[in-house]
Each structure stands twice: as structure tokens, then as C-alpha cells.
Amino acid sequence: MKEKAFALFSCLFLLASCQGGGESSLSESITQGSEDSSESDPGFALDNVYAHFAFDENEAGDILDFTGNLPSIHPSYVLETSPTKEGKDHIPFKPGIVGDAMLFDGYSTYGSVSGYEFAPGGNALSISAWVAPRSYNYSDPDVNDINSIQGIVSQYFKSGSLAFGFTLGYAREGKLAFGVGTDNGWYETWDEFDPLIQYEWNHVAASFDGASGKASIYLNGLPVGSVSLPEGSEIAVTADSDFYIGRNSVVASDGGCSKGVHSGLLDELYLTSDVLSPSEVRAIYQAGLVNGERKELPLQDVYLQNSLTDDLYKPQYHAGPLEHWMNEPHAPFYYNGLYHLFYQSNPNGPYFNGAAGINWGHLTSPDLVNWTNHKEILQPTKGTVAPDGLWSGGSLIAKDGTPVLLVTAGDYDHPGMVSNQNVALAFPKDLNDPYLREWEISDRLAIEQVAGQGRANEFRDANVYQDGDDYYLLICSGDETSSRGTALIYHTNANKEDYLYNWEYKGHVFDYYNSDAKYGTSWELPCLQPLLDESGEKTDKFILVISPAPASTADNNIIYWIGSFDKKSCRFTPDFPDPRRMDYGRNVFTGPSMMVDPSSGASLIFSIMQSQREAAPMASSGWAHNVGLVRELYYDSSRQDLGIRFAGDWSSLEGEVLYEKSQVKASQVNSDLAAFSSDMYSLELEISGLNEDFALHFRRSEQGDEATVLSISSGGSNCSIDTNLNKGNANTSAAGNSSGELTAEGKTTLTLYVDRSMVEALFNEQKTISCRSYTTDLYANGIKIASNPEQTIDHIKITAISSGMKEVV
């Protein structure tokens, strides 16, 4: 098909050239050709094409040069070598401008050739390609740095007056850039006005005309930048720098992830030793159109791929991005039959990037169990109130029923402001879209931190308690006169003028005077919500939830108080003086966000489940972290403490009942489950009158040398999960014994969710333990009761759970 397209375009190009009518006749000819065709036919018939990379799919997953000047290039791609995947994938191919295109992941995917002088030298070079960018790396919006671009094609070196080769790529927000090293030094040109369009096909071109002294760049057939250089300049060639496709020659690295890698699709890359004129570039662009328009691109073809279903560590029924990195989910709300949940996202790779350039990812669910991915809704943009970061925030439902997001707007320079963090609003662009996939950030700040309101530069993570027309907003900060953390509270009422931008500062919602470092110098992600009782009836109780920060010195497990909230003074008064742990895990269950479910009135808590792995294994596996199962919080009136349930309707994901028995001895359970092997299931257990310790081994190898050990003490007053026997946990923070107290009851109940490496256990609806179970034996999926074989189990039920993650929409 590529050969046919090339020949057809050759005829078009030669016909247009022979008409001799200059740019208009050439454009008309090419336009007519493209409008009469239902397929695009890009290419060009120049004598001096010295490389043509068509990116057609092939069994080896190689990048092939159709001119034959280069041998096949096998691209780098982490999922070919991931140690935890059953299958080894080659780089994905998708439908392209002609034939296929190659999908680059943004951090590991690129082709390279060493020891080859790829630039032809001389005084002429042109490049043409079709690209569909998915996401952009963060860089300083006010500095053009060629070393920070994501490369399309690149082979250069520059240092001082030395300069060799060339590079073509783009910076943050899709700013196109082209640089060349010449015998007169380094020259580069940038497109300052017309960025690449994300998730769409864009034609890019660049030309170096040394004879006349000019280098130019083009976007979608139009010139968008140029730089003058000395007439008679020639490209300085080098074999000392590798030739890259889909990567810049110079890259920074974060946790083993390269930052200068193309993110998205690439097709029809040509390099020539001729100078393409503006009319020729226009002709090439128009030949790639379909019925006069740029070819439509399905979101599924360029978005993060569902490529990790066979990764034996990655959870499958827990929500989260299909690939790459996430941090805490936040800003949940319910609207027109769907729950919406957002999360901190780096769509370029499984790394944190120091919080710079973080996007808001987006998930929806009809039932809190089945989740659909959508493309990110917000990203830092120069010239807005959030040029450097869009960090965690909250949501509210406005008086007219419109959902509104409260975003932490990051502005590192923050001219004239106290803080680099403030609160901005975002609104849906189309309320008729059932998924609310497009949002727009306001050009006004809703709340700007001012002196005397918390500690400067600690002002983030808004969460709203909504009571009729009254809105109470909590925000993370630190005490103004000490090193302690605190949460600030603001109030507005829907009957006030401009109420979404007219918040009144009400002080600290609550002060805790313990200065122990584990309670943090700031209280991240503070939440205040009312609690129903165990029967679903209203109470006068509220829960205050925080995550102490920073993680380097504080214990950032989620802690809480239960108490009362005075809406007039905006003060919370706890029922008990010291905070309590909600989850006994070792910093796995973190990053809280809360909402009141409008259908039931129940308070729901969302969380991130930390991977507990170092940067290198996250980079080699292609993912980092996931959303925790949604939990319902209630006031347990008998214990005068917090009660916890797993939320959502699980019936659609529950499959075969793998095992169920009542009044059965532990020895019989072990005999029945001798051949059990599953890594995605729920387990329900009831035991009466625990007169001795109980131990359950799961994620167990056949030999028993690897296992996750869940224990309940005699009398039911203590619970624990020990992951030290999981050899894959060795030398990671995932290893250890997590334990805590329970209120002993006549019957001990356990609900356990196992989703590959992810473990969430609920004891007596009182406390949870969340942990990671990394086994070196990837098929260590057995179960065994490792305590008294004569112990009677009142009831045990194991149910298969299928994936609840849906393809992107």
C-alpha cells in the first residue's frame, strides 16, 4: 500500500510541478487530488530522499527505511522486556496517514542507530513527517531549550561554538522546534504561535537552506518559524552522536524514564538533501488530507493503551490509568448517573517528575466498580492561572446544578502573590456530554492565599463539604507561627453575589497541638464530611481526615478524628484527643478524597494505593500506583468510632464462586483448596469464638516459601498482614508486618480483595490493612490456612472477580 501511495503522489507532484503556475497551481492540483480521494497519499517524489520511514507494521516490530540506506531498526520498548508480563509485546502500530503508524509511549519508545553520519552534509536538508502528539513534557514556559524538546528525529551535538547535526521536535504545549549545527555554529527556530494539536494528526516539516542562509519550520502546510544564518552555511555532520527516531539526542532522565521521547503517533517520516519550498511543503500536506480535511484519529489509537492486562503485578479491577503514573484521586462527584473521579496524572511515563506539569486524569463509573478512562481534562498552560501545575483539588455542585472543580493552580513565579499555590475553578464545556470530557479553567482565581492565612506556599488540595446552599472548603496548609500542620476553612453561600469567587476565610478548622514530626508540617488532602450511622440514619457526627506531609519526615498514612462541626464558627471539635489510623498498612492506603453519595447520603472515601516499588521497576513495568477500592464510612454507635464497608455494586464483576462452605474444619478447607490458583478474587470469612491465633496464607507458592500471611490473634483483638515472605518485596518498602488493634466481638469477619499485587483486607468493618504482595514466583496464587487444622470456619466464600476497567472513551 505504501508503494502504491508513493507512486500516486509522484504523479501528483510531477503534474503539479509541470504546470508551472507557482504555489497556487501546485496547491490547487494537490488539493483536487486529495479531495477526490477517500484515502490520503502523502509522500514526495524528490530525487534526493535519503530516508523514508513508513512505520508499517511488521512481525519484528522494526522501523524500516524504504530507501534501503539504513538497516532495520529495532526500537526500544520496555514492554518487550518487562519482567512481570506473561507476553512480550512489540511496539504498537495503529492506522496511519497511509498504512500504519507507530505509537510511541513518551518515555521508552524510540529507534536509534550508532556510528552513522545520517545528516548528508552540504547546504540542504528537509524533513517531513506526520505526528499525533498525546502529551507534552513539562519545561520552563519562558525558555526555549532545544535540549528539552521531545524529538521526532534527531542527531546533534552542541557545546559552545561546536555544533553538529540537526533535531526536529516539540516542547511543552506543542511548540515546534528545529535546530541545525553548521560550520558557522548552532541555529534554531521555534513556532511561538501555532502549537501542535493534541490527539490529532499534524503535518510538520523543516528545511535548511544553507545557500540562501535560512532555516524554516512548517505546521500543517504553513510556515510558522524561521531563522537567518550566514549564506553559504553547511551542516556539520557527526557520527559521534546516535541517530534517533522518536527521541531527542539530548534527554533528561527521571527514575529510568527518558523525558525527550515522542508521545503519540508518528508516520511517513522523510529526510531529503533538497530544500523544500513553501509550496512543496503545502503540496505534501494537502496530499495527506482526506476529502480536504486532516484524517480523523480515534482517541483509542493515540491514548494510553490497555497493554498491561497480562502484567502479573498490575491490578486489573482496581481503577487507574491504563499505563504510566498516577497520584492521588480527587474531586469526586456524581452527575447524571455517573460518578466522576479525577487523579494526578503523568501521561508521559511512570514517574513523578517532581510534580511539574502534572495533568488531571479522568475516570467515570455508574456503580463505583466499573470504571472508564477518559483523556486528561486539564494540563498546565502558559498564560493561564496554572502555568506550572494542576495539583489535587475538590468539587462542588453549583446552585444551578453544574459541577465545578476546584483546582490547585501551580505558578512557580507567582508575581505579586504570596503563594505559588492558589485555588482555581474549572467548568465543563458541554453539559450534554454524558462523560463531561472537556473542561475549561477559569482565568480568575477563586481563592488567592494571602498573608496570615496559613503558611505561604502550603495552600492546596481543596475539599468541599456542601450543605444546601452553604459550602465549606478545607485546604491544606501549615500553622502560621509554628512548624505544625493545619487545615484552613473557607465559607461561601450560593445566595451571595459571585459566590464561587467570594469565599470568606474562617481560620483553622481545628488545631492539634502535638508537634511530633509524624503529624506533619502540613496536612494534605484534608476532608470534612458528615457520617450516617450503621443503619444509614443521620447523626450529628463528622469525620475530619488528613494525610500528614511531607512523606520524607511525616507518617502520611490517612488519620482521622470523629467529632462535631459548628457551622457558624466553622470549627471542628473531636470526640477523642489523638487521631486514629483508618488503615494499618505501611503507607499504601494514602491520598484521601471524600464525597457524600447523593443517592444514599453515605460518605465515601477514595484513595491512592502506592506501588511501594523503587523507580527502576516502575519504569521497566510501565505503570505506577492505582486507585483504591471505594470505601463507605459510617459512625459505629456501639463502638463510638468509625465503621468501614467496601462500597459499590460488585455483581457485574463477580464471576464464578470458586469455593464456598459453612461449618467446615480448616483441614478440610486446605484439602479442598490444594489446587487453588487465582490472582483476582474476593474472600469472605467468618469465625466464631477465636480461642487461638488464626493464620491465612495467600499469594502462596506451591512450595510455601512465598506467601502473604494474614493473622488474627486469639480473641480477635489484633489483626496483621506480613509480607516478608514475598521475595519480590525484599529491599522495598512493601516488605514488613502491618498490624493493629481490633475491638473484639463474638464473631470475627474478614473481607479480603486480592487483585494481583494489590491486597485490601477489612476486619469486622472496623479497620483495614492495605498492602502490596510482590512474589518472585509470578504464579504464587495458592491459599492455605496455616493455623490449627481443627479450627472450625463458620463460613468461607471465594468469588472470582473480573476486570472493571473499560477502554478509553
Image: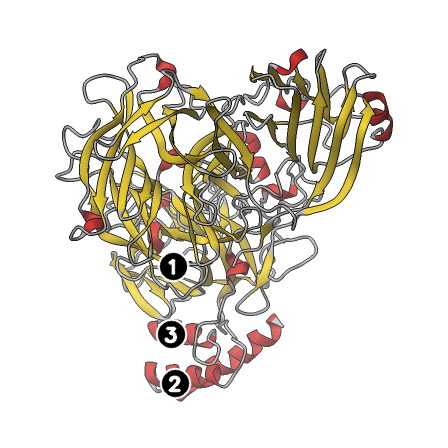
How far across and how far down the image is residue 797, in percent? 74, 34
Residue at 25% x, 53% y: name it.
442
Report the front residue among 14 and 177: 177
Hey, which quadrant is residue 786 in on the image?
A: top right
- Name the side, left or right, on which 619 lies relative to 229: right
Q: Which residue is mark 1?
A: 438
Left or right placement of residue 260 versus residue 802 in this view? left
Which residue sits at x=47%, y=23%? 641
Label 2 belongs to which residue? 28
Are there few (<14), some (14-19), or many (20+) residues within 10 Å of tag 1? some
Q: Position of residue 696 (x, y in %)?
A: 72, 22
Secondary structure under tag 3 reads helix
Question: Is mark 3 in CB contact (under 8 Å) with mark 2?
Answer: no
Q: Is residue 67 visible?
A: no
Rendered residue at 38%/30% (across/down): 541
275 to the left or right of 15: left
Name the residue tied to disc 3.
Answer: 282
Residue 118: percent from left, percent from top: 49, 52
Mark closest to the chain's N terminus, 2 or 1? 2
As helix, strand or loop, the secondary structure at mark 2 comes to helix
Amino acid type assigned to the residue bearing label 1 in the image: Glu
Asked which secondary structure carries label 1, the reply is loop
Corner quadrant of residue 78? top right
Say whether residue 5 is visible: yes
